[in-house]
Image (cartoon, rainbow, N blue to C red):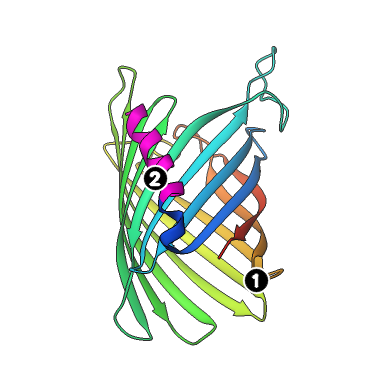
Amino acid sequence: MKNIITLCTIGLFICSPSVHALSLSYGHYYEDLSKKNVDVIGLEHTFKNRITLATEWKATPDNQDNGRPGTAFSHEKFYEKKFKAKYKYSFNNYYSAGPELEYANKTDGDKYKAKITNDFNLTNTDKVYVKMVGERMNYDAKKPSKKILYAESGYTKKIDKTKITYEYTYYHGQDTKLFNNKNTDYRHKFNMEYKLSSKISPYIEVRNESLSSKSDRRQTIFETGLSYTFF
C-alpha cells in the first residue's frame, strides 16, 4: 500500500503539465474541546476531460508529556494521507453530477469512500448541492469495521469576490454508534472564501461536530487557510 501511495503522489506531479487547473492548499484548524491542532496540505489538479486527481495530508503535534494535546506547529507528524479521484459532467447550465472515489491511509487503519455529487445552479451566483456518501473504515487492531452512510446538502452564494457556503450533513451508522450512543449524527459547516487575486484565495471555516460516540457533547472547529492556483 505504501508503494501505491508513493506512485500516486509522484503521478500528480508527472501529470501536472497536461492539466487544466492545478492548485495547492494549506489549512490549520483547532478543536475547542479536544484542544487538538491539525495542519492540512492539499494538492489538486483537473484535466481538460474534467477528471480531477487530488491528495491531502494531515499532521498533528505529538502529545505533551502530561498527555495533553501538543502545541500547534511543534513536533508534528502525519497521521492521515488521503487520495481521491472524481469526475463531473454538466448536463446543462443548471445541473451537473458525477462520482468520486477516495482512499485514506490513517495511523489506525484504512478508510474508503464512494460519493455521488449533484449540483443545481439556481443563478450565476447561487448553487445548491446534494452529496450521497458511503464510507467504510477498516481498523488495524482487533476492532470491527465501521460503515457509515451520509448525505451532505449545501447552499453556496457568490457576492463579488466572496463565496459563502453553508453545509448540513446527516450521518447514519450501520450497526455503529456515532453520537450520544446512537447510530445517527449531524454536522454544521460554514465557509467563507475571498478571491484575493486570480491565484490566491484565503478562507475561514467553522464547523460544529460531535465529540465522541459515547457523549452528547459537541465541539466547534475553527479553520483558516488559503489556496494557490498555478494555472
Predominant SS along the magenta part: helix
Q: Secondary structure at mark 1?
A: loop
The C terminus - image quarter: bottom right
Looking at the image, which residue is at 56% across and 67% down?
165
Q: In this picture, is 126 found above or below 221?
A: below
Q: Position of residue 160 (x, y in %)?
A: 67, 81
Say which mark, if any, is on residue 95: none
Q: How would you rate the neighbour count of disc 2 (Cα within 10 Å): few for under 14, some for 14-19, many for 20 or more?
A: few
Q: Position of residue 128 (x, y in %)?
A: 44, 75
| Residue 221 visible (yes or no) | no
Looking at the image, which residue is at 66% across and 25% down?
69
Residue 123 sits inside the magenta stretch: no
Looking at the image, which residue is at 61% across and 31% down?
60
Residue in the foreground of this view, choosing between 39 and 47: 47
Image: magenta residue range: 1-14
Give the residue number, with chain letter if any, for mark 1: 198
Give the residue number, with chain letter if any, for mark 2: 11
Left or right side of 84 for 165: right
The N terminus - image quarter: top left
Q: Position of residue 21 (x, y in %)?
A: 49, 64
Left or right side of 222 for 11: left
> Picture quarter containing residue 23?
bottom right
Q: Amino acid at mark 2?
A: Gly
Q: Position of residue 107 (x, y in %)?
A: 44, 25
| Residue 146 visible (yes or no) | yes
